[in-house]
Amino acid sequence: MTTVLTPMTVQPERDLLLTLAIPPELEDVARTQLGLVSTSQARTAGISGRRIATMVGNRTWRRLTQGVFDTRIGSLSALPWDARRCRAAWAAMLAFGPEAVAIGASALALHKVVGLPTTIRPEAALPKASNRLARDGMHARQFDAGLRTVVVGGRRVASVEWAVAQAVPELPRRHGLAVLDSVLHLGLLTPDGLERAHDLARGRRGIAAAHHLWELADGRSESAPESFGRLDCIDGGVPPDTLQLPLDDSPYPERGTSAGISAGTGGWWPRSTGRRCTTFPRLPLPTGLGRTGSSRRAASRCCGSRRGMSTV
């Protein structure tokens, strides 16, 4: 008997709708996994191997790697980046079987941590993994000694402490800082928990260049761009006086934040999350000061503190 697959719209997260070609028996699984299913899950739902091959052949389903299929209808570009990163994590776990555990950036994506790069490497850990298991851009690692996990969507995922320790040493600096800021801001880790993650990261490849990021981590950063801008200022020799500064003349003093600069804009852009600041014009950087400037005087000229603004 052939299973009829009627397109079904599901809502795995708020503000995210997916249209999937699945039978009702697969709805819960596919919703949790953002449209991805494994061969074993499909067969449990009554879809034979021959039927799977037919659907892949007529492009109803798309094969991501051996044993993993995308049941979603529509262009990948329509998905938000957060969903794409989570799908990468699910793809790795499904590809390497029921014992696979999402780790590193893949685990952070499932924990909803902000600040990750646009795309991440699908990565999972197994009790006995080797590089030979890697395929189609998905990587398998062996369990770290003492790895602690939590359950997300019915699958084991590295705890936030372990995921931070695994990911930050390998991330670009700006994303590493944004991740550290995010786990503090979201309350996923306390300062003590962040320090434990630092201890777990010691000795890992790339940690020598990332130690200082733990010293810079600040949970008052509310978004990745704030973290990026702060690091740009620090690198440029104009570290911020503070992160969140109330605006003395703002009708939203509790939401007053800082002024910021963006690499490549060629100027300083005062801003506030409470309201749009139009008092200060966009000013070019003084000649010879480089991308972010090199003096606090230049910062104060563009983002003077008299009106409650700071340099970041």
Image (tube, rainbow, N blue to C red):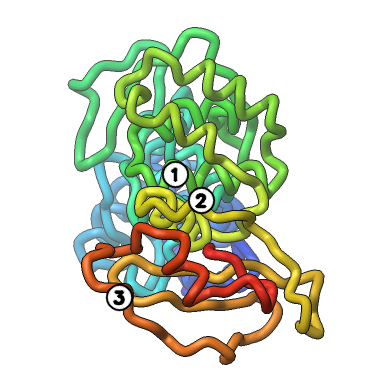
Of circles 3 and 2, which is in front? 3
SS state under label 1: helix
Q: Are marks 2 and 1 in contact (CB under 8 Å)?
A: yes
Q: Residue 128: percent from the left, percent from the top?
A: 35, 11
Residue at label 3?
266
Question: Looking at the picture, which amino acid does disc 3 mark?
Answer: Gly
Of circles 3 and 1, which is in front? 3
User: Residue drawn 63% across and 57% down?
Assistant: 243
For label 3, the crowd category at 10 Å Cα-Cα, with few meaning under 14, some 14 to 19 and many 20 or more, is some
Q: Which mark is residue 297?
A: none
User: Residue drawn 42% across and 86% down?
Assistant: 282
Q: Residue 79: percent from the left, percent from the top?
A: 42, 69
Can residue 277 be seen?
Answer: yes
Q: Find the distance from the CA under tag 3 to the CA under tag 2.
A: 42 Å
Q: Earlier in the sequence, mark 3 or mark 1?
A: 1
Question: Eyeballing the image, is 22 above or below 129?
Answer: below
Question: Looking at the picture, which amino acid does disc 2 mark?
Answer: Gln
User: Residue drawn 22% across and 30% down?
Assistant: 134
Q: Judge by depth and name the residue closer to the eye, 221 or 250.
A: 250
Q: Are marks 3 and 2 in contact (CB under 8 Å)?
A: no
SS state under label 2: loop
Question: Looking at the picture, which amino acid does disc 1 mark?
Answer: Trp
Residue at label 2?
33
User: Residue drawn 50% across and 58% down?
Assistant: 224
For label 1, the crowd category at 10 Å Cα-Cα, with few meaning under 14, some 14 to 19 and many 20 or more, is many
Q: Residue 46: percent from the left, percent from the top?
A: 48, 49
Q: Which mark is residue 90?
A: 1
Q: Judge by depth and name the residue closer to the eye, 6 or 312.
A: 312
> Is 5 on the left or on the right of 291, as rendered?
right
Q: Residue furthest top?
A: 145
